Image (spheres, grey):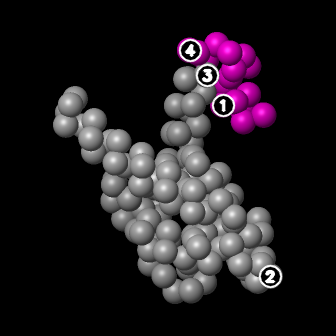
Amino acid sequence: DTARHFGCDNTLDPEENIRAGVNMLLAVRERYKRIAANPEELTKYTIAGYNAGTGRLKDCIDYARHLGVDVSRWDNVSAVIPHMQNDSIAALDPIKHGTFAGGLETMSYVRKVRAFHERYRHISP
């Protein structure tokens, strides 16, 4: 469904698949433009939203806001993500998707992608 939503009818067609992936990343990025403090933070949010899903990441942001956290920085939001595994989180009003068992994986994914970016940008600036 996601692939089709972003223009990919044949997921086995590499060109179609890549085009849909780029469209998805651009759509995910657009969601966080008003939240992120700067382009670097926007990139982190885009990576996180791509990995976790935008609905799940919205829950994390809303929970962080609920706690009074400055959500313009990914590190601030990621600091509350481990709490999203607790069953009690699902009862809170800002939470729409329940607990988030995959939060630690998303945090790791953002770190890994950023590390690869840093490594590769020196090869091809």
Give how far apart the Cα atoms at labels 2 and 3 are. Answer: 38 Å
Residue bearing the label numbered 4: 15
Residue bearing the label numbered 1: 6
Do callouts 4 and 3 mark residues in contact (Cβ within 8 Å)? yes
Q: Nearer the viewer, residue 109 or 15?
A: 109
Give how far apart the Cα atoms at labels 2 and 1 are. Answer: 33 Å
Give how far apart the Cα atoms at labels 1 and 3 are. Answer: 9 Å
Toward the bottom, the furthest residue is: 68
Do callouts 2 and 1 mark residues in contact (Cβ within 8 Å)? no
Seen in the image, is 5 located left or right of residue 117? right
Q: Secondary structure at mark 4?
A: helix
Question: Which segment is the magenta one?
Answer: 1-16
Q: Image height check: is 67 above or below 80?
A: below
Disc 4 residue type?
Glu
Q: Which of the two labelled residues, at mark 2 and mark 3, occupies the earlier sequence position?
A: 3
Quadrant of the snapshot with the N terminus: top right
Q: Secondary structure at mark 3?
A: helix
Q: Is residue 96 visible?
A: no
Q: Nearer the viewer, residue 42 or 102?
A: 102
Residue bearing the label numbered 2: 91
Disc 3 residue type?
Asn
The picture places residue 116, in percent across and down from the top left corner, at 35, 42
Q: Which of the two labelled residues, at mark 1 and mark 3, occupies the earlier sequence position?
A: 1
Residue bearing the label numbered 3: 17
Do callouts 1 and 3 mark residues in contact (Cβ within 8 Å)? no
